Amino acid sequence: MTEKDTGLPTPETRHKRKEAFIFMGGAFGIIFLIWLIYYLIFGQFEIYTDDAYVSGNLVTLMSQVSGTVIQINADDTDFVHQGQTIIKLNPHDTTIAFKRARAALAQTVRQTRQWYDNAYQAEATVTLRHANLIKSQLDLKRRVGLVGERAISREELQHYQTALQAAEAQYKIALHQSIAAVSLVNHTHLYTHPAVKRAIQDFKIAYLNLQRTTIVAPVTGYIAKRSVQVGQNIAVNTPMLAIVPLDAVWVDANYKESQLSHLRIGQPVTLSADAYDDVTYHGKVVGLNAGTGAAFALLPPQNATGNWIKIVQRLPVRISLDPDELKKNPLEIGLSMRVTVNARHHNGKQLATISPSQPVYETNVYAHQLADANKLIHHILHANAEDVSFKES
């Protein structure tokens, strides 16, 4: 009789089932053993999260002067190089202010040069008045003894006395005028005189304002969030657009507070992006944030209430990425990432203890803005005055 006839499994069927159960049990045992070995060697040291996102610098381009937009050279998604002209403002007002400052500098140099000439003239006048005073004193001294001998009249002697008093008064006036003239230029040089230096600073400000009507990209990156329009009259510090340098992005992985005990700075990290199917990124832990996202929120949660429920907090962990891998497969800001930190070695520090020794991020597009201005100032100074200085004698 067959199994179909009796409803019971035959010995052969039971044997096959037993072999199948043994095979499946062995397969599951091998799989479990493999998993256990992997966990003991690797898995227990891997700290995973999928609550991670790409972050980066968002360089907001603002106007440093007010004006009307007359030209826009880049739009959203465009790639721009550092120093490339992005926006131009109407330069007419700043050009007029620059020419006025240039004329004011030239006039100030000429006026200051006149002050030096007045100081020299005032000192010469003091010397002349002093000589006249000595002459009047000697003339009077010689004629005082002649009155008794009736060689001169008393009226003539009185004239010499009056001349001496006038010489003394003229000397005092000249001395005070010299002090006033010298006080304007004493211990100074024409090119470092306070009036000239102030005019030079006003000239530099006018020059910078003229240069700032041409707005350049401070960094290399991609245009985003453009809000400025041609013909728009913008004020100082008006946000116009943003530039995102995608060659220097990082990942902020939000780990649960229960996963932080073995996270340390410098640990290797393996990452994958939802935007790429078969791409693996590598990086390392840069540091742990100083507070959770809830603590830095605009309205932090208030837990001192009667119906409080504990919620597991997450702490942002910053992870740097390999620049070469970013060049091959760029990551845009905000993309989701899956992050696995290898915490096998957890003897390092969780928080940084050394201050940065170099700038975190910088641009040099504004470093030479005044180079041509200094050349113009040098030309204006030499065109309107000789090289003079004043020293009190």
Image: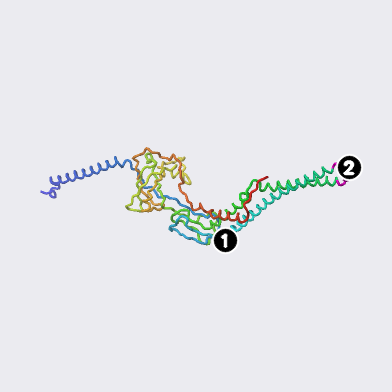
Neighbourhood count class around disc 2 (C-alpha, 10 Å): few under 14, some 14–19, many 20 upward: few
Neighbourhood count class around disc 1 (C-alpha, 10 Å): few under 14, some 14–19, many 20 upward: few
Toward the right, the furthest residue is 150
Q: Position of residue 60 (x, y in %)?
A: 48, 53
Residue ID at (49%, 56%): 216
Q: Where is residue 170 in the image (x, y as percent from the top left)?
A: 77, 47
Mark 2 vs 1: CB contact within 8 A: no
Q: In the displayed structure, does residue 30 sit left or right of residue 243?
A: left
Q: Return the disc, 2 or 1, that comes first in the chain's sequence.
A: 1
Front in this rendered view, residue 327 or 22: 327
Front in this rendered view, residue 278 or 302: 278
Nearer mark to the viewer, of 2 and 1: 2
Q: Distance between the residues labelled 2 and 1?
A: 86 Å
Query: As displayed, is residue 297 above or below residue 105?
Result: above
Q: Which quarter of the rendering shows the C terminus?
A: top right
The segment highlighted magenta reads: 144-156
The residue under label 2 is 149
The residue under label 1 is 92
Q: Position of residue 55 (x, y in %)?
A: 42, 50
Residue 120 magenta-highlighted: no
* Three-letter code for the amino acid on which mark 2 is drawn: Glu
